[in-house]
Every structure is written in C-alpha cells, then in structure tokens.
Image: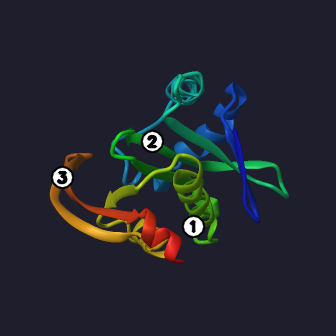
Amino acid sequence: MMLETHHLLMRDFVETDWQAVFTYQSDPLYLRYSYWTQRTQKDVCEFIQMFIDQQKEQPRTKFQLAVVLKEENQLIGNCGIRVNDPEMREANIGYELNTQYWGQGYAIEAAQAILKFGFEELGMHRIWSWCVSENVASVKVLEKIRMRCEGHLREKELIKGRWCDNFLYAILEHEWKAN
C-alpha cells in the first residue's frame, strides 16, 4: 500500500526500515512524551514486525505506514489509521516523526493524507486522535488538520512516573468534506 503527497511517500513497512526507526526512537527528545525510557534494536525490530504482520490481516484494519521524504528517499517517521469499529465506521490516527524533521509541516501533510485515505478509501464516518496535553506541537497538528477538541482527560496516563492529561480530538466525515 502506498500514499503520495507533495513531499512524502507513505508506504507499508519492510524489515530493513528498523534502522531509520531506531535512529529517531532513540532520541531523548522523541521519547519525552512516550512510555519508553529507551529503545533497543530488538524493541524496534518487534515494533516494525507488528506493522508488517498487520499488513497480512484480512480484512485489513490497521494501516501504519512508513513516512518517507520523496526527494531524499529517507524514512522520517510513521503515520497510520486503525479501524476501531467497522460497523460504526470509526477509526483513530497517530503519527510520529524523527525530531530532525519536526516543525516543517511533514506531520500535517502525512496526517492529512491518512485522513483522506480513512474517509475516501475506508469509508469512515468519524476519525479521532489523542495527544498528551503538554505536547503543544501535536495539538497544533491536530488542529491544523481541522480536528476539534472533544475532551480533556485528566491524569489519563502515567508516563515516566508522572500523571499526564490527554486531549481527545476528532473530525467527522461531513466536516472533512466541507473543506
């Protein structure tokens, strides 16, 4: 499976992608809002294998794609959509990027592409996401892709010994089509 945007190719993961993922998942800045305190090569290989295994599921309901800069052919992160309830046509999205590529619009570009795929190809009615409330950059991404904040979940997650609030965002199919 492959999606293409102006700057990005979003494609299914392959085993050899682990090295690029290990590079960014080992960065302390990347790990700031994560449960993980560190990542090993084994952790990242298992992470990639999970996505490869999901590609084989029938029907496929999870599409976590490698985000690759077209010009450099460089894997810089991942973005995906997971169908939570096929009958209710609901899914959630998520994304992560190598910190060297933060603030350049790539997360927005990838998230917009995955929303389009979710609404146009998967026929979703509602797509949601969440982020740690302190992750201002992720909040901005969700707002720029026109998701609306639906909730503030207080002390929802324990990350590295500290309770963190989450924000819940969503967009409906008719809202997406209106723009």
Q: Nearer the viewer, residue 136 or 28?
A: 136
- Where 113 sits versus 176, above or below? above
Q: Which of marks 1 and 2 is nearer the N terminus?
A: 2
| Residue at the image position 68 percent from the left and 25 percent from the top | 15
Relative placement, left or right, of 39 versus 90 is: right
Q: Is disc 1 in contact with disc 2, using a CB cutoff of under 8 Å?
A: no
The local secondary structure at tag 2 comes to strand
- For disc 3, the marked residue is 156
Residue at 59% x, 37% y is: 22
Secondary element at tag 1: helix
Taking the image as shown, residue 60 lies to the left or right of residue 154, namely right
Residue 108: which disc?
A: 1
Residue 48 picture location, percent across and down: 57, 30
Q: What element carries label 3?
A: strand
x, y percent for residue 6: 76, 65
How far apart marks 1 and 2 lie (CA) works out to 18 Å
Contact between marks 1 and 3 (CB within 8 A): the answer is no
Q: What residue is at 55 percent from the left and 30 percent from the top? A: 51
The amino acid type found where label 3 is placed reads Lys
Image coordinates for residue 113, horizontal then vertical, percent: 61, 59
- Residue 85 occupies which quadrant of the picture? top left
Direction from residue 61 to residue 136 in the image, left or right: left
CA–CA distance in space, label 2 to label 3: 21 Å
Q: In which quarter of the image is residue 97?
A: bottom right
Colour treatment of the image = rainbow
x and y percentages locating residue 133 in the rendered image:
29, 65
Of circles 2 and 3, the one toward us is: 2
Which residue position holds label 2? 82
Residue 32 appears in the rendering: yes
Neighbour tally class for label 1: few under 14, some 14-19, many 20 plus, Cα within 10 Å: some
Q: Is residue 30 above or below residue 51?
A: below
Q: What residue type is labelled 1?
A: Ile
